[in-house]
């Protein structure tokens, strides 16, 4: 669980805090910072207080349009965490938030610093929108975890078609200087009309900007009484563990319901051997509650005691489900929506996202309920009644459970054969997405709808780009079709005011749809879901997952995290997928921390059933590895520092992280990594 605090040191004001006791927490941190600065002459950078880690960052990145010479401290950022992320990964997350606040809110913060009138409520709302979206995506997306953008892997003919269409579009809007197209968070194409060109890091930040503007997540507020009794293990302990994978947050795993031992008000814990129902429950509600408890057992809640299951079912039926509801209840809602066919399988199960809200609205519409997007008690009861899963024959046996540990060994060492290729799972989901991508065009308002899916409202505002030396750009951000985004950046406006400019630029959405997405939209959505599949590398013994990063251009290649069993055992697949995700996140967190703090450029770490391999190296322009000179172990710009040492010689800074099963010999890992590298770059593999 993480808590972000943003302080204004000059005005001694808290601008934003993710804690219910904001009036108490924020002044305490400002006092701590000032006390340490006065005592030792330096502001604190990191504090480790037992299980709590506190990372500080002081923003000097926003260009201040003041004539005064000295630099001013515009904002202080504080990130508090009790998760198992390393200090280096927490600092990377905080630095990402800092860059996005500078990009999106730079103009507003400058106006505030210049004593101009600023809508503080709108400012805090935007801060919440940025923080919630980034924190949610950081735990879902490998590209955000590694802070590098991913390109959609297209053949040359389609790529040239995309480039031509976006170039033709910019000719119709003469004051547009940059145009970028994303599908999901993957880059399709971009075009720069004038110099300076967009930096590669800007392309990554703009992919997040599209999500913040068009697909924002809901804010999470830290509440002390909701913290679980159990605490996550440290990464160092996790290296020697297999079964006990520590959670990414205090709400348990993404796709399954889990709960620790529940502590009652009397301080005691234990199993209840009796079942009771609240007095205001009628017989029909009791019947529905029993059905919910049965479903809880099948989707991962078998470890809960009876009273906990009753509490969840009672909350689900009596109070409904809101964005502020507990993670277990939200997970239950998402599984019901999935069972009745209103929610996509790729949607996160423990978060009340916009996908959940849209699914609830469609269900309410189909069942003639009030279309609010919140699952009120009437909606949740109707969901239970409509779920076909609960009406299956009791004699039908449950799906057999499988041993995840043994599955990894069988799949990874079975001569490249898997029970069902993970690619088939991706293809099934992809074809479904492609079918849903058939669009109906409303020519009256240029609003594109995909079946019942309504596109997000376009936005237009000033933002700051890193390479424009402090000059703001006007950013138009639009969703062309489902999960496909267009960003146009202008130095000047075509019209006299922002409202008319937005209406003018809105035409670009329809034009791009007609030129590109009307014919290729379904294909691009399908490609985004199966951009790179792990089944291509089945013949590499013991390989579970990998991440390749080109730090010179901030590009990443990584397969989607998918279960290795195909579609045969759904419950086991959910657990396996989540296990792989946690291992990948832990691998990156630990290896990145060792690189930053100790300058370890080659690492092999072994735990009970898994092994992590990490390598950082430099390539010349002919993709030949060159000897890397040592850099300062404490440098957090280690990639840039490494490249600068070779200037003017052109080099690329590369990283490869691989996850293997634990029984693979370390001597084989080195050879496997070389084979993987050769496959990724279509080079002849060296023995």
Image (cartoon, rainbow, N blue to C red):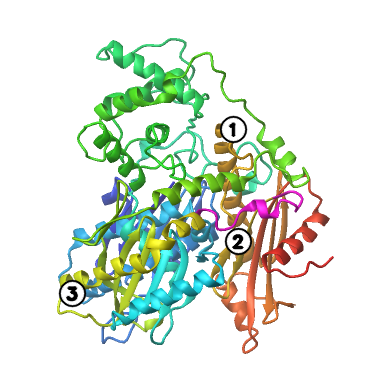
| Distance between mark 1 and mark 2 Cα atoms | 34 Å
The residue pinned by badge 3 equals 115
Which x, y percent locates residue 184? 43, 58
Magenta residues, start to end: 529-543
Q: Residues within 10 Å of mark 2 (few under 14, many from 20)?
A: many
Which x, y percent locates residue 25? 32, 51
The answer to which of 409 and 222 lies nearer the viewer is 409
Give the image quarter of residue 631.
bottom right
Which x, y percent locates residue 217? 35, 51
Q: Secondary structure at mark 3?
A: loop
Residue located at (61% from left, 80% from top): 643
| Distance between mark 3 and mark 2 Cα atoms | 41 Å
The residue pinned by badge 2 equals 592
Q: Residues within 10 Å of mark 1 (few under 14, many from 20)?
A: some
Q: Which of the two labelled residues, at mark 1 and mark 2, occupies the earlier sequence position?
A: 1
Q: Residues within 10 Å of mark 3 (few under 14, many from 20)?
A: few
Q: Which mark is residue 624?
A: none
The answer to which of 244 and 436 lies nearer the viewer is 436
């Amino acid at each position: 669980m993480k808590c972000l605090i943003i302080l204004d040191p000059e005005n001694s004001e808290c601008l934003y805090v993710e804690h219910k006791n904001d009036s108490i927490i924020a002044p305490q941190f400002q006092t701590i910072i000032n006390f340490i600065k006065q005592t030792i002459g330096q502001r604190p950078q990191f504090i480790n207080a037992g299980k709590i880690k506190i990372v500080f960052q002081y923003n000097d990145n926003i260009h201040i349009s003041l004539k005064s010479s000295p630099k001013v401290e515009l904002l202080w950022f504080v990130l508090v965490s009790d998760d198992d992320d390393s200090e280096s990964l927490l600092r990377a997350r905080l630095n990402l938030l800092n860059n996005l606040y500078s990009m999106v809110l730079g103009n507003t913060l400058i106006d505030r610093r210049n004593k101009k009138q600023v809508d503080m409520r709108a400012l805090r709302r935007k801060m919440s929108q940025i923080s919630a979206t980034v924190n949610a995506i950081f735990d879902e997306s490998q590209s955000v975890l590694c802070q590098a953008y991913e390109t959609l892997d297209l053949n040359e003919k389609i790529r040239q078609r995309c480039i031509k269409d976006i170039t033709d579009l910019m000719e119709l809007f003469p004051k547009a200087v940059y145009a970028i197209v994303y599908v999901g968070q993957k880059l399709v194409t971009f075009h720069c009309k004038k110099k300076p060109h967009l930096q590669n890091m800007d392309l990554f930040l703009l992919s997040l900007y599209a999500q913040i503007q068009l697909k924002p997540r809901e804010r999470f507020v830290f509440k002390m009484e909701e913290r679980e009794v159990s605490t996550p293990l440290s990464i160092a302990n996790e290296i020697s563990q297999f079964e006990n994978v520590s959670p990414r947050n205090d709400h348990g795993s993404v796709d399954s319901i889990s709960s620790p031992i529940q502590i009652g008000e009397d301080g005691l814990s234990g199993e209840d051997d009796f079942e009771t129902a609240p007095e205001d429950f009628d017989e029909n509600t009791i019947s529905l509650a029993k059905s919910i408890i049965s479903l809880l057992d099948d989707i991962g809640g078998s470890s809960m005691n009876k009273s906990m299951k009753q509490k969840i079912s009672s909350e689900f039926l009596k109070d409904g489900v809101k964005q502020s509801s507990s993670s277990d209840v939200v997970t239950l809602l998402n599984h019901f929506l999935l069972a009745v066919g209103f929610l996509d399988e790729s949607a996160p199960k423990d978060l009340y996202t916009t996908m959940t809200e849209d699914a609830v609205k469609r269900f309410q519409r189909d069942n003639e309920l009030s279309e609010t997007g919140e699952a009120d008690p009437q909606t949740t009861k109707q969901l239970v009644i409509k779920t076909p899963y609960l009406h299956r024959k009791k004699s039908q046996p449950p799906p057999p459970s499988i041993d995840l540990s043994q599955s990894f060994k069988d799949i990874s060492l079975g001569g490249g054969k898997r029970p069902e290729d993970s690619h088939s799972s991706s293809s099934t989901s992809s074809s479904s997405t492609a079918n849903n991508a058939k669009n109906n065009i409303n020519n009256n308002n240029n609003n594109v709808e995909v079946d019942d899916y309504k596109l997000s409202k376009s936005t237009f505002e000033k933002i700051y780009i890193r390479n424009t030396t402090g000059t703001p750009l006007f950013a138009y951000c639009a969703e062309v079709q489902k999960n496909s985004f267009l960003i146009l950046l202008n130095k000047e406006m075509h019209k006299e005011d922002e409202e008319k400019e937005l209406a003018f630029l809105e035409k670009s959405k329809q034009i791009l749809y007609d030129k590109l997405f009307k014919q290729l939209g379904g294909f691009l959505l399908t490609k985004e879901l199966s951009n790179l599949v792990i089944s291509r590398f089945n013949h590499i013994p013991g390989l579970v997952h990998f991440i390749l990063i080109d730090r010179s251009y901030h590009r990443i290649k990584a397969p989607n995290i998918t279960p290795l069993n195909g579609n045969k055992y759904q419950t086991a697949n959910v657990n396996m997928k989540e296990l792989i995700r946690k291992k990948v996140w832990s691998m990156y967190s630990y290896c990145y921390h060792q690189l930053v703090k100790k300058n370890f450029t080659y690492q092999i770490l072994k735990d009970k059933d898994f092994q992590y391999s990490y390598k950082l190296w430099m390539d010349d322009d002919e993709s030949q590895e060159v000897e890397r000179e040592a850099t300062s172990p404490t440098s957090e710009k280690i990639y840039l520092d490494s490249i600068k040492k070779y200037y003017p010689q052109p080099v690329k800074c590369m990283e490869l992280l691989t996850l293997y099963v634990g029984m693979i010999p370390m001597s084989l890992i080195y050879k496997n990594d070389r084979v993987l590298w050769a496959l990724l770059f279509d080079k002849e593999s060296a023995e």
